[in-house]
Structures are given as C-alpha cells and as structure tokens.
Amino acid sequence: MITLKSNNLQSYLEALPSKILLIFASPTCPACKIVVPQVEKQVGGQIEILYIDGDKWENIADEYDIEWYPTLILLNEGKEIKRINRVTTKIINKILK
C-alpha cells in the first residue's frame, strides 16, 4: 500500500498501474483502523492500493465527494468503476468481485 504524501494525486495515479484502489480513511476513524488493514491483506498483491488520509488531504476527499470513512474507490484508467462507502468487514469481498 502506498500512502499519499502530497496533494498532487494526479502524479501518483500516473506512476501507478491502470487499475488502482483508492482508500479514503482517517487515522481517527475506529472503523478505518479495522477495515484498512483487512482490505490491504485481502487485495494487496492483486491490485495497487493508494491510501489517502481524508483529514490531511481534505481537498482531494472533496474532489472525490467523500462523505464517509472508510470509502474505497476502484479506478481503471483513471475512471471510477466501483465505489464502496462506509466499508465494513462484511463487504470487503465486494471489492474482489
């Protein structure tokens, strides 16, 4: 998993494979602390994961209309193909389908 370290998301996306899973989360979110490691464990190695701290990069979270943490967005060629809001451990497998 790669953690976004600058507000230039586009440069990260250009350097990564065409299929990317964006994880919008917050270090203060209790659900995120459980879900994010589980997502990484289940899909890591199958797809590149980019973690975005929505508190730190609020402008990017706003750009993607993030209302809840954690939110997962699957991009292919830069286009959103799947979004899962309010991710729970029970729906992590939807990412793989």
Image (cartoon, rainbow, N blue to C red):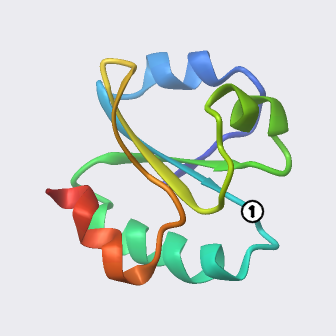
Residue pictured at 65% horizontal, 35% vertical = 65
Residue 54 in the image: x percent, y percent? 75, 48
- In percent of width and height, residue 51 lies at 58, 50
Query: What is the total number of numbered labels drawn onto the structure image?
Result: 1
Q: Is residue 20 above or below residue 3?
A: above
**The image quarter in which residue 8 lies:** top right
Task: Describe the element under mark 1 as helix, strand or loop.
Answer: loop
In this rendering, the answer to whether 50 lies above or below 6 is below
Vertical arrangement, residue 18 with respect to residue 32, above or below:
above
Q: Quadrant of the C terminus?
A: bottom left
Identified by mark 1, the residue type is Ser
* Extreme residue in the left direction: 97
Mark 1, residue position? 26
Residue 57 position in % (x across, y down) = 80, 39
In the image, is 14 to the left or to the right of 74? right
| Residue displayed at 32% across by 61% down | 44
